[in-house]
Amino acid sequence: MARDDTVLALSYAVRLPVVLKYLGQLSLVLAVLTLPPLLAALWFEDHGFAWRLLLLITLTGSIGAVLSRLPAPARLQVNEALVITALAFAGSALLMAWPLMAAGIGFSAALFEAVSAVTTTGLSSLVSVEGMPPAFLFTRAWMQWYGGLGIVVLTVALLLGHGLASHRLVDPELRAENIATTTRHYARRMLLVYVLLTLSGLFLLLLVQVDIFSAVTHVLAAVSTGGFSSADASLAALPPAAQAVVSLLCVAGAVALPLYYLTFSRSLTEVMRDVELRALLLMLSVFGVALALVLAAHGMPWDAALRHGVLLGISAQTTSGFSSLEIGGLADGAMLLLILAMLGGGSLGSTAGGIKLLRLLILARLVQLALWRTAVAEHAVVQPWLGTRRLEHDDIERVLLLILLFLLVIALSWLPFVLLGHDPLDALFEVVSATATVGLSSGLSAGDLPPLLQGVLCFDMLAGRVEIVALLVLLFPGTWFGKRANVS
C-alpha cells in the first residue's frame, strides 16, 4: 500500500452528530452572552435592536437546547475540534450581523463589524462611529471581550465536563503536558483571570475620571486586545492618564493568561524568567523607541514623538489596534515598523493575535542551531532547546507550518488589493492588520471598499483568530467526505 493510501485508510471525516452536539453547546453559551447587549439596548431604549437580540437569544437557545441533547462522544477527533472552533467564530459573527443592522447599516457592513468584533480585530467599515447608537457600540466591544477569551473556552468553563472530548476543544493538538490538569478547571482559571483583569481595568479608568460608558467599552476592547473605541479619534479622544491605563490593559491582555495564575504559586522572579514575557517587554521597548525616532525624524517634537511612538508600539505589538495618530498620514518607515510589530504579536495563550512571539523565538533558535552545527564536529548531536524546554520535532514542524501559512495568507490577500489599484504599502498594512487581528488601519477599510476586498479581510480576520489551520480544515473537502468513526 502506498504511503498516501495508508494515510487515507487511517483518516476519518468529521461526524455530523458530534459537530452538531458541540455547536448546540456553543449556541447555548451564545444565547447567554447576548443577554448583556439586550440589557444595554433596553437601558438605552433602543427597542428595534432589543427585539432583534431577543429573537436571536430565543433562536440560539432553542436550537442549542435541542442539539446539546445529542450523545457526547468518548473521543473528539482533531478535525472535529478545529471545525467546531472555526464555526464558533464564523457562526457567531454571522448570527450577530442581523441585530447590528438595526443601527441603520447594510448587511455587508454589519457582517464586517461582527467578524471584526468576535475576532478581536477592530477594523471598521464605518466612516464614523460617534453617531452610532450606544447599544451598538457596547455590543461591538462586548463581542470583542468574549471573542478574546474564546467562545470555546467559555463553553468548556460553563457547560462541558473534563473529559478528553472537551479537552480537544481547548487544545486540539492535545499536548501531553496538559492532560494532568482537568480541562474545565483550566478554562475556569482562565475565565477568572480574564474577569479580574477586566474589573481592575474598569476601576482604574473610573479612577482617572473617564465616563462610565467610555470606560466600559474601552476596558472590554483593551483586555481583549480588540481596539474598538466609542470615539472616532480612538485613543486620542481620551485624556493622557486614561491613554496610559488603556495601554497598560493592552499589555496585560497580550501576556499569556496562564502566567497570571502561576504568580500565586511562584515568585515574581520566576515568572519574569518566562522567555515569552521577556521577549514581549523587549519588543515593546524596541518598537516604541524606533517609532519615536522615526516620528521625530519627520518633524514631530521629541516629547510628542516619544508619547505617540510608545502608544503606537504597544498598540501594534499587543495587536490591540488603538491609535493615537492618523495611521494613513505616517511616514513609510513608521508604517513598516508597525507592520513588523503587528506580525510578531503577543504571547501564546493571550488574547493577542499575530504569529505569536513564542513561535518567532523557536524560529530564531532553529536559525541559531543551524549556525552552531556548522562549527561542531560532524557526528555531534545538537538538540534544540528554548529556555528549559526541549523542542520536539512535532513542535518545530507545527511552528514552521503556522508561520508559513500566516505569511502565505498575507501574500495571497495582498494581491487583490494591488491588482485593483490600491497603494501597495497601504494594502499590505491593512492585510497584515486583519490577519494579525490588530485593527490599525491605513484607511482602506472604512468607506467604499468593494465587497470582494471586504470579504478578503473577513477571511483574514477569521483565519488569524483561529490560527489559519482550523479555517483550512473547515474548507478542506476531506474533512466532510469519507468514512466516519462511530460516535460512541
Image (cartoon, grey):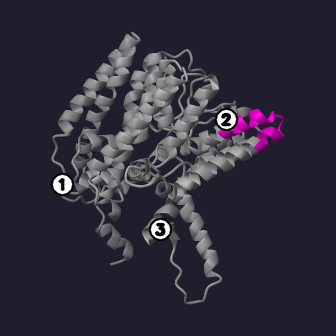
x then y, percent, for residue 216: 46, 24
Residue shown at the point (50%, 29%) measured from the top left:
204
Mark 3 residue crowding within 10 angstroms, few (<14) / some (14–19) / many (20+)? few
Inspect the image, locate mark 3, and give the three-letter code of the amino acid beneath it: Thr
Q: Which residue is mark 1?
A: 487
Q: Kindly report the distance in space between the C-alpha atoms of the residues bearing marks 1 and 3.
A: 40 Å
Q: Does residue 331 appear to the left or right of 27 in the view shown?
A: right
x then y, percent, for residue 224: 47, 37
Report the span colored magenta.
293-310
Residue shown at the point (56%, 29%) measured from the top left:
124
Q: Quadrant of the N terminus?
A: bottom left
Element under label 1? Answer: loop
| Residue 408 visible in image | no
Q: Which residue is mark 3?
A: 388
Q: Does residue 406 appear to the left or right of 478 in the view shown?
A: right
Q: Is residue 485 above or below residue 259?
A: below
Which circle marks residue 442 in the picture?
2
